Image (spheres, rainbow, N blue to C red):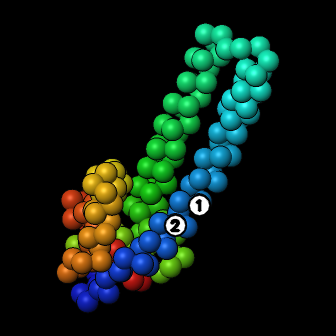
Amino acid sequence: MENNNPTYAGFWLRFAALLIDGILTSILNAIIMSPLLGQTMSLAMRTETDGLTEYDIISWMTTFVFSNLSMIVLSWLYFALMESSNFKGSLGKRLVGLQVTTMDGQRIGFGRATGRYFGKILSAFILMIGYIMAGFTEKKQALHDILAGTLVVKR
């Protein structure tokens, strides 16, 4: 359903939603990664008494890389799937009454949601200025919203 007079979501509401989503995705990632993190802790405890072997170093590096990649993939799928669904937003956005739409108020597709997610990396990379832009642009768009052609509006 198209909204001809949307109320754009400001910086602080968006920040609250992102904080909620960050907590949720961190908990989910911790659950998924707990077996590997247990292995890493075991390795660290053994290192104090036995020293490191090449296998230990490779095992630790693999765990480190996998955990970081897993967090990226998990976050990408969480945001892209939720924002392109009928919910039009992540759980955090839903809890604070926000949704992500196209410029004309329609539901965004998975491809656009994916572009928006990876655009957030650029928004963060430039000293978070891309996020801060949401407090100053006419339609309260962050850099990743401008790049993806999306709006974050109040439901």
Check the picture and name the quadrant holding the N terminus. Answer: bottom left
Left or right relative to 98: residue 137: left
Left or right relative to 21: residue 76: left
What residue do we see at 54% from left, 76% from top? 95
Q: Specify the amino acid type for callout 1.
A: Ile
Is residue 32 visible in this depiction of the protein?
yes
What residue do we see at 51% from left, 38% from top? 68
Whether residue 78 is situated above or below residue 43 in the rendered picture: below
Which picture quadrant has residue 57?
A: top right
What residue do we see at 77% from left, 27% from top? 45
Whether residue 107 is situated above or below residue 74 in the rendered picture: below
| Furthest residue in direction top, as rendered | 54
Question: At which x and y percent is residue 22?
Answer: 53, 59
Which picture quadrant has residue 50?
A: top right
Question: At which x and y percent is residue 121?
Answer: 34, 51
Check the picture and name the quadrant holding the C terminus. Answer: bottom left
> Which residue is denoted by mark 1 in the rendering?
23
Whether residue 114 is situated above or below residue 85 in the rendered picture: above
Q: Give the distance between the C-alpha atoms of the residues marked 1 and 2, in whole angstroms.
A: 6 Å
Q: Specify the amino acid type for callout 2.
A: Leu
Q: Residues within 10 Å of mark 2 (few under 14, many from 20)?
A: few
Helix or strand or loop: what does disc 1 sit on? Answer: helix
Is residue 91 visible in this depiction of the protein?
no
Helix or strand or loop: what does disc 2 sit on? Answer: helix
Tell me, for residue 19, which label it has, or none.
Answer: 2
Is the residue under label 2 in contact with that under label 1 (CB below 8 Å)? yes
Question: At which x and y percent is residue 120?
Answer: 34, 56
Q: Residues within 10 Å of mark 1 (few under 14, many from 20)?
A: few
Of residue 86 and residue 93, the one placed in the foreground of this image is 93
Question: At which x and y percent is residue 43?
Answer: 72, 24
What residue do we see at 51% from left, 30% from top? 65
Of residue 6 and residue 141, the one placed in the foreground of this image is 141
